[in-house]
Amino acid sequence: MSLFNKFILLSQINAVLFVVSISWAANPLELELEDFIEIAIKHNPEIEIAIEQHLGGKGVLTQSRSLYYPRFTAEADLGRANLEDLSPVDEDTFAHGLLRATQLIYDFGRTTGLIDSSRFKVDASTENLKQVSQDVVFGVKANFYSVLEKQRLISVAEQAVDNYMQQLHRAKKYYEAGVRAKIDVINAEVNLAAQKLNLLRANADLKTAHVDLEKIIGQQPNNGNYILITDEPQLSDLAESKPKMPNTMQNLLITSKESRPGLKKFTYLMHSAESTLIQAKGDYWPSINALGDYNEYETDLESLRDQWQISVGLTWEFFSGFETEGKVAEAGALLREVRAALREYDLRITKEVTDSYLRADENREGVDLANQALQLAEENLRLADGRYKSGLGDLLEFNDAVLLLTQNQSSLVINYYNFLTELARIERAIGIIPELAGYKYPQ
């Protein structure tokens, strides 16, 4: 192949690669809310931390249970001994082997308290993992809705820019025709510049919302080349298509007491603290252990013979310098602290359910009111535009109408997505997240 043909072939390959790269950039990854939740479950650091804490707790439980099982120890040593007036020799090199078995029989609650405390902590870590997962899913939903909100607000700002651009063009034409004064042109230019600034801020807010969403899911999908997919209707149909309110507040409060993982977590921690107190009080009493030894010697010294023994021993520390009293006091304080934390968390759940329900209801009504106001603002702009064209109205009246329309469009968007966010907050408050219904937590 000639050098020229090689050059042509290389150029064709580069062209194909360029087309492929352009095609990739033009076709971003499409992700729905469920996709973001799935990514977050796999990659969110908080969930990973909660999983490792759960596995660590299981390791502690295994260590605690090991105290119930017998322990076997093997020892070996080599040395030289001298014992006077022995026959046939009184000095010899010897090899010694020891096999020892020990078994705890009873220690008045020390071991059982430790095991129970560890087991309840594992149960608490499971509930903590569930709560963290629910918090993460709520965060995904809130940030997902925030991105959608910012996208809608950009559309509102773009429409406002378009309105002001049309008005500027019209003001210039009227000025050139001698129908309007120069101040109308200047006023339109000022309003257009101000609205372009609002559009710039809206785009910056969207980028920030994307960063927040990527933070909660734990990664940047497709290196940032992705778009959010949703089946939400047009702005004019938001009010009609909004979701319904969930059950009554009273029923939601009852559900939260039964389903909220965080509440169960503190319940298990309270049981763990009670077991820790039992463990601490066990130090007031003795422990009973069984011991078995087998010694084997390899030597010519007659005094060193193979031997074995089995015994049951009792160990009782009558005085420990008030160490036991300190442990009991510490365990008692921990128990009272956890009980108080449980009551505080119960009150917090009541507040969360109540606040989220009231906020959701407020935003639901806000969506309807904003929709009504938007319809009036659209009619007001139509009338103001007609009056300006006919010479009956001035530019100030038109600008006020455009501003009123933009404000009500923004209000409808904000109230709608606040409503969706509060519905998600209600799910988290009562402890029932539909997207986690089939999720298998580590056991």
Image (cartoon, rainbow, N blue to C red):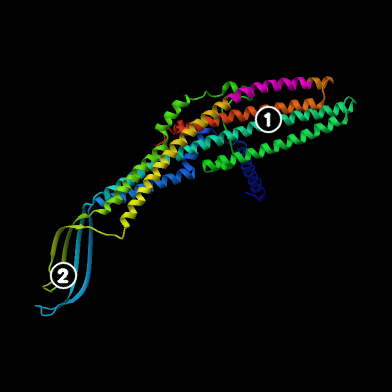
Q: Pick whichever of labels 1 and 2 is earlier in the sequence.
A: 1
Q: Is residue 72 left or right of residue 396?
A: left
**Does residue 22 appear in this view?**
no
How many numbered marks does the figure carry?
A: 2
The residue labelled by disc 1 is 156
Q: Is residue 377 magenta?
A: yes
Q: Is residue 4 magenta?
A: no
Q: Secondary structure at mark 1?
A: helix
> How far across and how far down the image is residue 427, in percent?
48, 31
Look at 45% across and 45% down and name the residue there.
48
**Does residue 6 appear in this view?**
yes
> How far across and how far down the image is residue 396, in percent?
80, 27
> How far across and how far down the image is residue 163, in percent?
75, 28
Q: Is residue 373 left or right of residue 267?
A: right
Look at 40% across and 45% down and name the residue there.
337
Magenta part, dominant SS: helix
- Which is nearer the eye, 355 or 1? 355
In this rendering, is residue 86 above or below 44? below
In this rendering, is residue 96 above or below 271? below
Look at 61% across and 43% down and name the residue there.
17
The residue labelled by disc 2 is 298
Q: Residue 440 sits in which quadrant?
A: top left
In this rendering, is residue 214 above or below 385? below
Indicate the quadrant containing the C terminus: top left, top right, bottom left or bottom right: top left
Q: Marks 1 and 2, how far apart in space?
A: 95 Å
- Which is nearer the eye, 408 or 237? 408
Q: Residue 91 sits in which quadrant?
A: bottom left
From which residue to which does the magenta span run?
365-385
> How far across and how far down the image is residue 63, in percent?
31, 51
Q: Disc 1 marks which amino acid? A: Val
Q: Is residue 223 left or right of residue 253?
A: right
Question: What numbered label is drawn on residue 231?
Answer: none
